[in-house]
Image: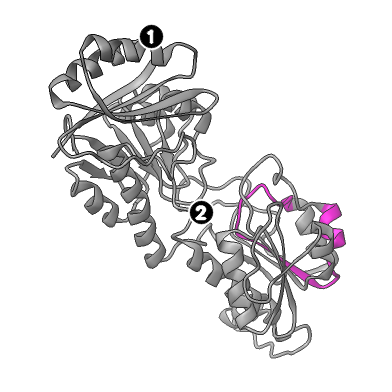
Amino acid sequence: MTLQRPIRALLLEGIHPGARDVLAAEGVSVTLMDKSPPKADLPKLVKEYDVLGIRSKTQLTKDVLDAATDLIAIGAFCIGTNQIDLVKANANGVPVFNAPLSNTRSVAELIIAEVVMLSRQLGDRSREVHLGQWNKRAVGCREIRGKTLGIVGYGHIGSQVGVLAEAMGMRVAFYDIATRLPMGNNKPAPSLADLLGQSDFVTLHVPATAQTRHMIGASEIAQMRSGSYLLNASRGDVVVIDQLAGALQSGHLAGAAVDVYPEEPEANGTGFVSDLQNLNNVILTPHIGGSTEEAQEAIGREVSTALAKFLTSGTTSSAVNFPHVDQPLLHGKHRILNVHRNVPGVMSDITRIISDQKANIFGQVLVTDPAIGYLVMDLDQEVSSEVCGQIATLPTSIRTRRLEDR
């Protein structure tokens, strides 16, 4: 299908150029920016584009989304989507696509590296040598072979961590609120408390939800083994930072590795402050779990491919906030995509329009959620323009597009 007019896409925060190539191949005009503009400038900027691509720093709030009057799709070139008002995007008829798979390996490798670093106190030894201090010691330094790694959240990343840890000779337990298929000899734990109590290392891989906010605080840390380690590369508000710092200062925990924080700078630079700074055997990294060239290229292609499929066929099967449709294209027909409020009578109005135009429907899918309905309909070319125009004028319609056959 070809688009009715050139689609304009803005990709912020240094998204990999591979994303531009995928979209440009479909005739999309793509603008790349290395950074996100200041918050005050964002609403004015987004007015000029149909598609937005962001990473973790750009905040697409209600005000920004309402300003983006031409916006038809958003690409989150990362795993998380908590920087986007998903409810508002849904109400505006805008699907959001993310990359749940592409940085899995990069994050998993970082966790395994940090497990070894913590167990050998490598961060402290490296810093000391840089400062001219020679402190050769074995006290408190151990192999990870035979130790137990506890994984909280056994999704794409957590399960990959388990596979790598087992290959290193570790025992692996995991806890997840959903039933998960164990990989290799990884074993499920009956409860979070059970997992915390049996693990030498605990690594967190959960999404940002009301249920996971502050899920690891003083009481949970107290359930961990004395001398164990905590790693967090999931979301910044999963761990209560000052309570983690207290457990490290008291010696209950022997170390920690943290890649995400409750509040993170909007851009690179100096001035970041955390209660975890200057503590022994604590590895602090600036949200780089997925920051490898391989991951960024894969993310760029994964999200841009999903965007391209939506733009050219209306496919929303990988959207995180939208009814899922994946309807095969019909050669020689025009496709109408309509997002409408999910209220009674909509389909009666659309059926009336089709009947009045003496149109013949060759394919139709309607999927709804509590707020909206998403209709994908294939019609004869001769009547598609008039039908699309009349559907768009219905008071229940939010967004309506027509795709022409190549």
Residue at left 29%, top 52%? 19
Give residue 44's position: percent from left, percent from top.
33, 26
Mark 2 falls on what kind of element? loop
Other residues around mark 2 within 10 Å, as few (<14) / some (14–19) / many (≥20): few
Q: Quadrant of residue 292?
A: bottom left
According to the picture, the residue beneath numbered tag 1 turns out to be: 395
**Residue 133 has which mark?**
none
Amino acid type assigned to the residue bearing label 2 in the image? Thr
Other residues around mark 1 within 10 Å, as few (<14) / some (14–19) / many (≥20): few
What segment is highlighted magenta in the picture?
218-241
Q: Is residue 222 magenta?
A: yes
Give how far apart the Cα atoms at labels 2 and 1 are: 51 Å
Q: Where, quadrant-wise, is the N terminus in this rendering?
A: top left
Q: Is residue 348 magenta?
A: no
**Residue 270 has which mark?**
2
Q: Nearer the viewer, residue 257 or 304?
A: 304
